[in-house]
Amino acid sequence: MAQTLMIYNGTTDETADEPRTGGIPLVPADFSWPHCDTCEGAMKFLAHLPVEQGVVSVFQCENDPGLCEEWEAFEGGNRAFLFPREGLVPAAVPAEGDTLLGAVSAIKLETVDEDTYNDAREQYRLRSGRGRLVLGSLGGEADWLYEDQWPACPGCGQLMTFVGHLEEGNENATAANFGGGCGYVLVCDPCRSAAFLTQS
Ligand SMILES: [Zn+2]
Ligand SMILES: [Zn+2]
């Protein structure tokens, strides 16, 4: 099955309603910016990802890297939201905390004919010579770095549906911190919920 890679495509507007990492999240009007359960700091907004089920918005605490269980789903160190596609507005960014990435990165989608995400990323790297331009993928199947790690939806208890991989970024200065690993984005469509976790 072909993989749909997300490829770094320069910069874009900080509130663009298109796949991007960084910038300002687009959120429902009653949204409150997520804070970390462990350090209580404001989380960092990582990605705006339009998917079939809506828009997934991904946040992770980077105030105390490695100390806030930010790699686990539902442990309070990260948050992902599944918003409706319409009616979103730019969020009010908290004044304190490590809240925004250092760059807004536009994403173009590119299909690569490989059976797994890691093979597709490798093929892109060999072809382009620039593997870090791959910012993740949308759709397809989860390609776990280690053991399968499907989170159960807190609403209904069912295992959540995979919607995409997320990489740290194309350059160290502006990248997210997944401990050198890869992020996994999942949703539960009936409950309108989302999850994020990383493996490294
Ligand atoms: Zn924290
Ligand atoms: Zn559910």
Image: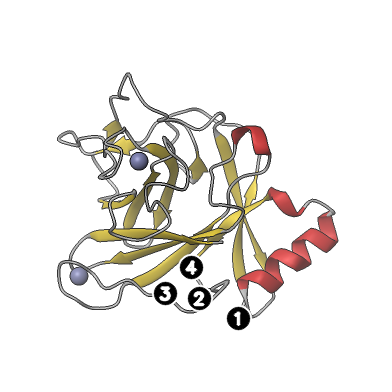
- Contact? badges 4 and 2 (CB < 8 Å): no
Residue at position x 65%, y 65% in the image? 111
Label 3 – label 1 distance at C-alpha: 22 Å
Label 2 – label 1 distance at C-alpha: 9 Å
Residue type pointed to by label 2: Glu
Q: Given this view, does label 3 or label 4 mark the residue nearer the observer?
A: 3
Label 3 – label 4 distance at C-alpha: 17 Å
Q: Which residue is mark 3?
A: 149
| Upstream in sequence: badge 2 or badge 3 | 2
Under circle 4, the secondary element is loop
Q: Which mark is residue 141?
A: 2
When asked about the image quadrant of residue 44, the answer is: top left
When asked about the image quadrant of residue 154, the answer is: bottom left
Crowding near pointer 3: few (<14 within 10 Å), some, many (20+)?
A: some
Q: Quadrant of the C terminus?
A: bottom right
Q: Given this view, does label 2 or label 3 mark the residue nearer the observer?
A: 3
Asked whether 46 or 8 is in front, the reply is: 46
Residue type pointed to by label 3: Gln
Q: Quadrant of the N terminus?
A: bottom right
| Upstream in sequence: badge 2 or badge 1 | 1
Q: Position of residue 89 (x, y in %)?
A: 28, 32
Under circle 3, the secondary element is loop
Residue type pointed to by label 1: Met
Up/down of 19 relative to 161, above or below? above
Asked whether 78 or 57 is in front, the reply is: 78
Q: Position of residue 84 (x, y in %)?
A: 25, 50
